[in-house]
Amino acid sequence: MSRKSSTSLTEGVPSTTKAVLPPYEEPNSPPVKLDLEKPPLGVEEPDKNVKLKYPKSVFFIVVNEFCERFNFYGMRTVLTLYMKQILDFSEDKATVLYHTFLMLSYFTPIPGAILADTYLGKFKTIAILSCIYAFGSIMLAVAAIPNFLPQTGFSMTGLLIIAIGTGGIKPCVSAFGGDQFVRPQQDRQLEAFFSVFYFSVNAGSLISTFITPILREDVHCFGDDTCYPLAFGVPAILMIVSIVIFVAGKPLYTIKKPEGNIMGEFFKCIGHAINRRFKSKGEKRDHWLDFASDKFDKQLIQDVKRVLAVAFVFIPLPVFWALYDQQGSRWTFQATRMNGDLGGFVLKPDQMQIINPLLILLLVPLFEAVIYPCFKKSGLLTPLRRIGCGLVLCGLSFVISGFLEIALEPTYATIPADGRMQLNFINTLPCQVNVTYRVTDKNGDLSIKANKYEFVQDLEADQDIFASAFLENADCGSYLQFNGGFSTGEVKLGKGGGTKGYSILITERENELTITRLNNEEQLDKSDTGDPSVAFFVDDNTFQEYAGLNITMRQETKKKTYEYIYDLNDTAATTPEVEYIVQTEYQKTEIGTYELFYNETPVGKLENLIQGGVYRVVIQKALNESDSYHVMTVEVTPPNSVNILWLLPQYFVVTVGEVMFSVTGLTFSYSQAPLSMKSVMQAIWLLVVAFGNLIDIIVIQFQSDMSQADEFFLFAGIMGIAVIIFTAMSWNYKYVEDEKKENEDEKKRLSTLSDHKTDSSSSSSSSDEEVYAKKGEENKAFSE
């Protein structure tokens, strides 16, 4: 049986039929039920009683979509952390590049649709651009391998290729799936297909959003404590699988030839009207688009007017996406500064992104079945009001994130400003020590209890450091007595550089009080992954040489044994010089409690490491000359004390906003578009997303000195302005009549024309209008 259905997803389906229309393959936008149009005027409606078999070809399309979405969202989930941790970009730069990638991904669907509808057709466009897409994914995975290729250049090139590929196929896949059905005989099957198609989109994104952070962090490869090549590589493999599956279904596909794109007519009409308006001096028209009437059909001009009326209302809407898409950038970085320990399970910061699609699946049925029906009779929640509520809720979510950021600030590392430094005084003795310190612009006294520490911040850098330690008497604990005086006298500890921290040890040598500064700087900032960071001081005069010795941290859990080894290669440089002290580098570790082994000898425990904490552990030979060791933990930077679940309120609010904004916006844009301009309207909707990410790029580039909390409040303020503008623009908006009424008016108009024209001219006019309607319907690249 021949299949002559249009390339449109909606052509030929009666307006009484509902179908689920996937919103340009985004998992965070649920299926939308839309009224589908009747066949173009003059086209006989097929017999719906004819039963046709469900097309087997759609199986290949659905599986292809699952694999492609797994690739895109799996890669996107870990992208900002990759840029910060591996490419060593700042959070601002990583955020800007992330939104640049998203912006390109939503600009490229337009040329992709034109390519499919005008030149190659959907099958060839999907096949060719998918290969390009897969090449970019492979390039990104290979670039993530350390010391193999120039990582930054190849990673950015790979992302550019991915943006071209994913954007190019985005408008084509679901439309190609719709081509496999004969309508209206298979309307119900088409509806079922879109439901399954949408499920595959969400399944791919949900699974990959959960899995790729595990591959990133829990697998170690190529000598790193992360494995981004695997986190990018597994999705890339799925992309290759998607191509193989898609091409394998070719013998079963209904493949239609490209028949032109209405977007060209749309822009030509606008351009011609503008050109004639400026050239026609003194000539007046009811609308500036009427200047194009000398070249373009009146119906086309009327359709363009309707599209521009909707596009005018859309002007403030990019702000929604500017805020919403920060879930993968700013909100993910915010999650790295929080405690993901849920008691037996550690939720990784990038895994928080799974909350949004999960909430979508729960909230959409609730809104459709309960909330919207409650407001339907009152007429309070019209489509534009729903969109406005979505904008408000999205802005509110950033107010919440701003207050959360303020609550997080006390747990952040205190990094000295330029030209300033920090000193960490560590008392390793079993008794209280009094310390006096002096730097050029500041001096003070400290009383440090036994085996405790004190920090002195905001000292002038590159200046001589002087300090003295003294005891109140010779007794220090129950076993240590000092022979001579109880004071070190003032000791010069050298100079400390700017924006750094230094540790000063108070210990003993040959029963004399000793104070010294370790010359290597301390790590003050938290790890970029949010994991704990641990390093060691060893003070043991029983070993003349540390070479070949090590410290081992070991934690045994039900699932896995974690072990970290620190090699002790040489004594640390100190000022003044004190022998037998060694200092290790920091390593990122898992959270929990660890057994400590010094040269394979158990020496104690390291209790309760928490995410984000920076710990300097001192292992010291017992001062009473016994065979035991003393372990002391210095919390250089406080851990993340705010639980990651405090992100749930802002995720919940923004998701409710998305349900009201994105779902309604898609429905509104589709229903308000004229028959011939459905694809153009969907193109404009995609551009709204692209321009939203452009707003992120601009704002973040120009606010480098603003705190993160203030930036969140700034975006909330921008949203407030957008809400006011949207309210003003949409206040007098007039909704178009339903499709049935529109068709009836169209028939009356054609009937009136036939009374004044010859049969031939009437036929020509009707033919022109059908051509425009057909073009709009058959260019379905954007109607998902």
Image (cartoon, grey):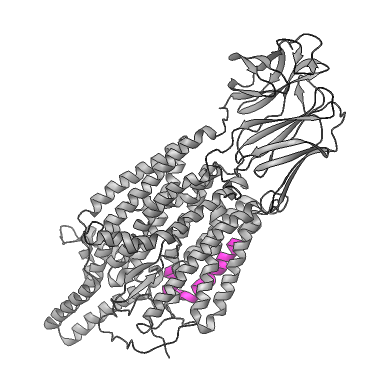
The percent position of residue 661, horizontal first and vertical second, equals 35, 56
Let me know if residue 596 is in the magenta part. no
Quarter of the image holding residue 298? bottom left
Residue extent of the magenta highlight: 113-137
Quarter of the image holding residue 748? bottom left
Q: In the shown orientation, is residue 89 left or right of residue 190?
A: right
The percent position of residue 235, horizontal first and vertical second, equals 59, 62
Q: In the shown orientation, is residue 663 left or right of residue 644?
A: left
Quadrant of the drawing holding the N terminus: bottom left
> Residue lying farthest top?
485
665, above or below 440, in the image: below
117, above or below 473, in the image: below
Asked if residue 274 can be seen in this view, the reply is no
The percent position of residue 576, horizontal first and vertical second, equals 76, 19
Front residue of 60/635: it is 635
At 66% across and 20% down in the image, what residue appears? 449
